[in-house]
Image: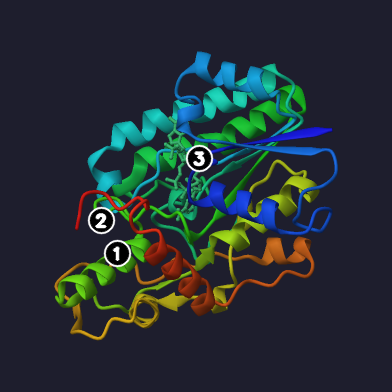
Amino acid sequence: MSVILVTGGSGLVGKAIQYVIETEPEGSRFGKKPGETWVFAGSADGDLRDQAQTKKLFEKYKPTHVIHLAALVGGLFANMKYKLDFLRDNVLINDNVLHTSHLTGVKKVISCLSTCVYPDKVEYPLDETKIHLGLPHDSNFGYAYAKRMVDVSNHAYKDQFGHNFTSAIPTNVFGPHDNYDLESAHVIPGLVHKCYLAKKNGTPFVVGGTGKPLRQFIYSQDLAKLFIWMLRNYDDVEPLILSVDETEEVSIKQVADAIVKAVGFEGEYTFDTARADGQFRKPASNKKLLSLVGDFQFTPFEQALDESVKWFLENYDTARTGKQQ
Ligand SMILES: NC(=O)c1ccc[n+]([C@@H]2O[C@H](COP(=O)([O-])OP(=O)(O)OC[C@H]3O[C@@H](n4cnc5c(N)ncnc54)[C@H](OP(=O)(O)O)[C@@H]3O)[C@@H](O)[C@H]2O)c1
């Protein structure tokens, strides 16, 4: 019998894991196994910045395994403006989850890092050995150092207690249940929301920057399957990058084109080249993942984007859109 607690279970990645567990055939590779109970916890179930609430959550569900996704997450603007919040909230959440897991005898914890926590100046492609090789970018050092400490903690728990605590490193994630608030959204949900508003209000759809930068995007449902696979098969303390191949990079223009198509937007569509582009590429290698995972099919980007936009259009009233109309 095992109880798998997914912290951050109400977010983009957590909802995708719940969807996969509930829709894949029981007993199949990514489906629920006999004897498994899955618990998806959001912040309403307990504020993980608080030690007592964390303990209460663990006492209630008695998890044997934890997929730890809960985090204060945000785009560039939010990261730059609230550096101390990103540092402190995430340090507290991570320490409470890992230490409570330790105290209650949880057998395995997979925490979630991000390719955003890598050094600003580093040789590309990123791989699992380069997380600590230099300072993070100044814009998100709070988030980056809090996340890097998870890897440090995992090693300390392993060295001192022999625990099976590890971490996954996804690239940019998108999918249903994303954060579409224009103040804090990542690039895909931000552009989806902007395009939707442009169509609704009959205004131009303006994409910030030249559209040339390249990024690796992973569909939340593919990422969910990889988390489930990791839970069952990956027992090393060293982190694992969960990403599509470097050859699958797409440009921001390709992203915007696909959004225009999926939203059915037919108005004026331009690029504001006065806006900064950010880094041109920050490729991450998925070699280690591919050497371990066996047969795994990533959803083609356009199909995944289409499904995500469809979800947004159907759930606009309840989606996390912030105050913009
Ligand atoms: N999105 C990406 O592109 C991306 C890329 C790489 C890595 N990641 C990582 O993936 C993980 C999941 O991210 P996501 O995109 O799914 O984020 P998300 O949609 O913003 O969800 C965040 C989750 O964390 C929960 N949470 C936040 N503060 C909490 C607190 N104090 N106590 C308890 N729960 C709290 C939220 O609960 P409520 O919603 O109920 O408040 C929500 O379930 C994070 O660790 C993130 O760093 C994300």
**In this view of the protein, can residue 196 be seen by the observer?**
yes
For the residue labelled by badge 3, is the local secondary structure a helix, a strand or a loop? Answer: helix
Marks 2 and 1, how far apart in space?
Answer: 7 Å
Q: Would you say 204 lies left or right of 294 here?
A: left
User: How many marks overall?
Assistant: 3
- Are there few (<14), some (14-19), or many (20+) residues within 10 Å of tag 1? many
Q: Nearer the viewer, mark 2 or mark 3?
A: 2
Asked where in the image residue 311 lies, by quadrant, the reply is bottom left
The x and y percentages for residue 292 are 77, 61
Kindly identify the amino acid type of the residue bearing the numbered disc 3. Answer: Arg
Is the C-beta of the residue carrying label 3 under 8 Å from the nearest atom of ligand 1? no
Near-viewer residue (137 or 186)? 186
Asked where in the image residue 222 lies, by quadrant, the reply is bottom right
Asked where in the image residue 294 lies, by quadrant, the reply is bottom right
For the point 54% across and 21% down, the residue is 54
Kindly identify the amino acid type of the residue bearing the numbered disc 1. Answer: His
Kindly identify the amino acid type of the residue bearing the numbered disc 2. Answer: Leu
Which residue has dot 3 on it?
Answer: 148
Which residue has dot 2 on it?
Answer: 182
Residue 193 got which mark?
1
Marks 2 and 3, how far apart in space?
Answer: 27 Å
Above/below status of 194 relative to 88: below
Above/below status of 51 relative to 120: above
Q: Do the CB atoms of the residues marked 2 and 1 lie less than 8 Å apart?
A: yes
Near-viewer residue (268 or 280)? 268
The x and y percentages for residue 167 are 62, 44
Q: Do the CB atoms of the residues marked 2 and 3 lie less than 8 Å apart?
A: no
- Are there few (<14), some (14-19), or many (20+) residues within 10 Å of tag 3? some
Q: Which comes sooner in the sequence, label 2 or label 3?
A: 3
Q: Nearer the viewer, mark 2 or mark 1?
A: 1
For the point 73% across and 69% down, the residue is 296
